Image (cartoon, helix red, strand yellow):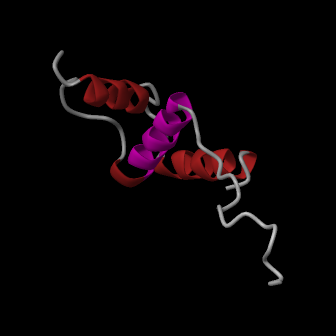
Protein backbone atom coordinates (compact mmCIF):
# COMPACT_ATOMS: atom_id res chain seq x y z
CA UNK A 1 0.00 0.00 0.00
CA UNK A 2 1.35 3.41 -0.91
CA UNK A 3 1.85 6.16 1.64
CA UNK A 4 -0.59 8.35 -0.27
CA UNK A 5 -3.40 5.82 0.02
CA UNK A 6 -6.42 7.32 1.68
CA UNK A 7 -5.36 10.88 0.89
CA UNK A 8 -7.29 12.96 -1.58
CA UNK A 9 -5.39 14.05 -4.66
CA UNK A 10 -7.44 17.27 -4.79
CA UNK A 11 -5.58 20.43 -3.81
CA UNK A 12 -6.52 22.06 -0.50
CA UNK A 13 -9.36 24.56 -0.62
CA UNK A 14 -8.23 27.87 -2.01
CA UNK A 15 -9.65 31.17 -0.88
CA UNK A 16 -12.06 32.66 -3.41
CA UNK A 17 -12.71 36.39 -2.87
CA UNK A 18 -16.21 37.78 -3.37
CA UNK A 19 -16.99 40.08 -6.28
CA UNK A 20 -16.87 43.08 -3.94
CA UNK A 21 -13.43 42.06 -2.68
CA UNK A 22 -12.17 41.51 -6.22
CA UNK A 23 -13.40 44.97 -7.21
CA UNK A 24 -11.64 46.45 -4.18
CA UNK A 25 -8.37 44.71 -5.15
CA UNK A 26 -8.83 45.95 -8.73
CA UNK A 27 -9.47 49.53 -7.66
CA UNK A 28 -6.42 49.63 -5.38
CA UNK A 29 -4.26 48.09 -8.10
CA UNK A 30 -5.43 50.59 -10.74
CA UNK A 31 -5.02 53.54 -8.36
CA UNK A 32 -1.50 52.39 -7.43
CA UNK A 33 -0.39 51.78 -11.00
CA UNK A 34 -2.29 54.38 -13.04
CA UNK A 35 -3.32 57.04 -10.53
CA UNK A 36 -6.75 58.60 -10.26
CA UNK A 37 -9.56 57.29 -12.45
CA UNK A 38 -9.88 59.39 -15.59
CA UNK A 39 -12.05 59.08 -18.62
CA UNK A 40 -15.74 58.56 -19.06
CA UNK A 41 -17.76 55.88 -17.34
CA UNK A 42 -18.32 52.86 -19.61
CA UNK A 43 -21.70 52.62 -21.27
CA UNK A 44 -24.79 50.65 -20.36
CA UNK A 45 -23.76 47.64 -22.46
CA UNK A 46 -20.52 47.17 -20.49
CA UNK A 47 -21.70 46.37 -16.94
CA UNK A 48 -18.37 44.82 -15.87
CA UNK A 49 -16.50 47.90 -17.06
CA UNK A 50 -18.97 50.09 -15.15
CA UNK A 51 -18.47 48.12 -11.92
CA UNK A 52 -14.70 48.39 -12.28
CA UNK A 53 -14.88 52.09 -13.14
CA UNK A 54 -17.19 52.78 -10.18
CA UNK A 55 -14.87 50.94 -7.76
CA UNK A 56 -11.78 52.75 -9.04
CA UNK A 57 -13.52 56.14 -9.26
CA UNK A 58 -14.73 55.78 -5.64
CA UNK A 59 -11.11 56.06 -4.44
CA UNK A 60 -11.09 59.69 -5.53
CA UNK A 61 -7.76 61.41 -4.90
CA UNK A 62 -6.12 58.57 -2.96
CA UNK A 63 -2.37 58.67 -3.60
CA UNK A 64 -0.56 55.82 -5.32
CA UNK A 65 1.30 55.08 -2.09
CA UNK A 66 -1.93 54.92 -0.07
CA UNK A 67 -3.44 52.60 -2.67
CA UNK A 68 -0.39 50.30 -2.52
CA UNK A 69 -0.58 50.19 1.26
CA UNK A 70 -4.33 49.50 1.16
CA UNK A 71 -3.80 46.69 -1.38
CA UNK A 72 -1.15 45.04 0.79
CA UNK A 73 -3.26 45.47 3.94
CA UNK A 74 -6.23 43.85 2.19
CA UNK A 75 -4.05 40.91 1.07
CA UNK A 76 -2.71 40.44 4.60
CA UNK A 77 -6.24 40.57 6.00
CA UNK A 78 -7.12 37.51 3.93
CA UNK A 79 -3.77 35.78 4.43
CA UNK A 80 -2.86 36.02 0.76
Residue at screen point 51% across, 35% down = 24
Task: Give the residue furthest to the front.
Answer: 1
Q: Quadrant of residue 44?
A: top left
User: On screen, 70 above or below 42?
Assistant: below
Quarter of the image that includes the C terminus: bottom right
User: On screen, 74 above or below 11?
Assistant: above
**Is residue 59 covered in magenta?**
no
Q: Is 50 placed left or right of 21 in the picture?
A: left
Q: Could you say where residue 32 lies in the image, as x and y percent from the top left?
A: 44, 50
Q: Is 55 placed left or right of 39 in the picture?
A: right
The residue range painted magenta reads 19-32
Q: Main secondary structure of the magenta part?
A: helix
Quarter of the image that includes the N terminus: bottom right
User: On screen, 45 above or below 36?
Assistant: above
User: On screen, 58 above or below 71?
Assistant: above
Q: Could you say where residue 58 lies in the image, as x and y percent from the top left?
A: 44, 25
**Is residue 25 covered in magenta?**
yes
Amino acid sequence: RSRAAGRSSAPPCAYRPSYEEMLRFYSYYKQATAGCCQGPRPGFWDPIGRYKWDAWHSLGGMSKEEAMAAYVAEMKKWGL
